[in-house]
Amino acid sequence: MPTLAHRLVRFFRHAPHTYVVGGAVRDRLLGRDVHDFDLLVQTDGLAVARHLADALEGAYVPLDADMATARVVLGREQVDIAQQRGMHLEDDLWLRDFSVNAMAIPLSAWLDKTPTVMDPVGGQADLATRLVRAVSEEAFRYDPGRLLRAPRLAAQLGGTIEPQTEQWLRRDAHRLPEVSGERQRDEFWRCLLLPGAETVMRRLDQLGLLGLLLPEVTAMQGVTQRPPHTLDVYDHSLGVLTALEGLLVALGVQPGEADPMDAAALAPYREALASHLLEEPVRGRPRWSLLKFAALVHDTGKPATRTVKRGIAHFYGHEGVGADMAAPVGERLKLSGREIAWLKLVIRHHLRPLQLSQLDPPSPRAQYRFFRDLGDAAPDLLLLSIADNRAKGDPDDESAAPDAILALTVEMLGLYYQPQTALVVAPPALVNGYDLMRELELGPGPYVGELLESIREAAAAGEVTTREEAVALARRTLAEARG
């Protein structure tokens, strides 16, 4: 099947003044694979994009009517098409954000081995030194969305922001709230997708951007904790982010060198976990990136719940407060309802694996309740808990030993991925509501559901195995309640 590049060259064969610009050119010069294209055309970008979507059987998504910009989505690939600004190509390139994004290659020459690069701003030289340099002093004023793009691009390139550009960025940082929630989310999420996200978050904080984007996160700075924690809540949360990335590397989800112990322990479930984490509830935001976001914000309830008794800090109920805070955070970043619900669930229950690990061993009832409450978020929470405990800072504290959480995770994953032999995950349905109403002479109501749940829990623990035993249990439970 022809590649997307071949299909684009064929479609635009009669439009010689069509150019590939932006990140696609940058990635090609770096020798990276190009899957998404930014094209510059001389006519109405919206109309061209609609024709392209029809021809390639893709989805047409208008982006900016004023700028005549639209997107064509083709499975996991996409093409953004914009109308050229100004009379000449150079006019448009001088209006772009950074020099490394202000280069163009004629689409007709894209398949050549060494195509000519139009580079009036000096992007190739900056790319060679991994320097992010604004095209003009007005770059951030013209589009404050570029404020987040600069540190992300520097991290992506493994480079630095040019000093003058950084001065302009700091000067204009206060304009970040002018950017729509969708654009803030998208630029921030690209930061989160990068390996070494902790470093990127710290850089955003240094530039005065993190507090504008996520004030709930910077509010954790300086909030000290009780032993075994040796870090404040902010540094601990960033440490959780890094520890989680280590697990993602062990599962082959993010690039890097895996810890041998983690790789060996998780090996039986590596394929299943990777498939789970690579799911995309929303395009471009895989489940593993949402898990990284949860690592960053899971303790945002601590500043509001901190109390000190006899010199020891406590955070009673912080998980519930943090879960409640997740909704406005998610809404501000325009996350989907499904993502927000998942985030609230994981934050509310993030202490559960630690509590289970302190039972010797956890009872079938406790395991059943865990899987019942978490559903398909159970693997996510187990991985987050490993990272959470590894980032406490005191490797000698046995109550939060990472190996204990890792061992629990392996045990629980064994149950989760083999439910046919694990009653605690999927107990048999011994009776239904109609059975109970008939046998116990009950009318419909919430109490029937409560009786069914008590039967499911007993079945998960192996305490009832037949229909008769289930009905007898319900009869006893009902008699005790009436008594």
Image (cartoon, grey):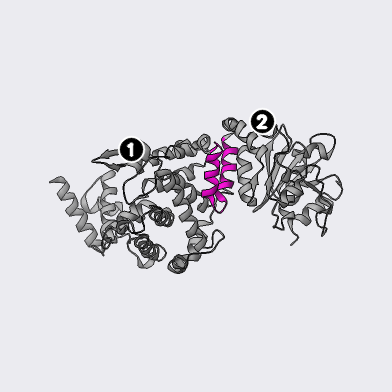
Is label 1 in contact with label 2 (beta carbons under 8 Å)?
no
Apparent side of residue 173 relative to residue 5 in the rendered image (left or right): left
**Does 180 lie within the magenta span?**
no
Please provide percent x and percent y for residue 190.
Answer: 59, 47
Q: Which mark is residue 292?
A: none
Q: Earlier in the sequence, mark 1 or mark 2?
A: 2
Q: Splitting the image into 4 quarters, where does residue 471 fall?
A: bottom left
Q: Which residue lies furthest to the front in this view?
A: 163
Please provide percent x and percent y for residue 430.
Answer: 30, 60
Q: Which region of the structure is painted magenta? A: 181-209
Element under disc 2 = helix
Residue at the location (48% across, 61% down)? Answer: 273
Residue at the location (44% across, 67% down)? Answer: 261
**Does 205 lie within the magenta span?**
yes
Quickly name the residue at label 1: 305
Considering the whole magenta stretch, tell me its main secondary structure.
helix
Query: Looking at the image, can residue 59 be seen?
Result: no
Please provide percent x and percent y for residue 448.
Answer: 27, 48
Quickly name the residue at label 2: 141
Residue at the location (53% across, 48% down)? Answer: 199
Q: Splitting the image into 4 quarters, where does residue 415 fall?
A: bottom left
Q: Residue furthest left?
A: 483
Apparent side of residue 286 relative to residue 361 in the rendered image (left or right): right
Alpha carbons under labels 1 and 2: distance apart: 39 Å
Label 2 amino acid?
Arg
Other-residue count near label 2 (Cα within 10 Å), few / some / many at <14 / 14–19 / ≥20: some
- Relative to residue 73, is residue 215 depicted above or below? above
The quadrant of the image that shows the N terminus is: bottom right
Q: Splitting the image into 4 quarters, where does residue 409 fall?
A: bottom left
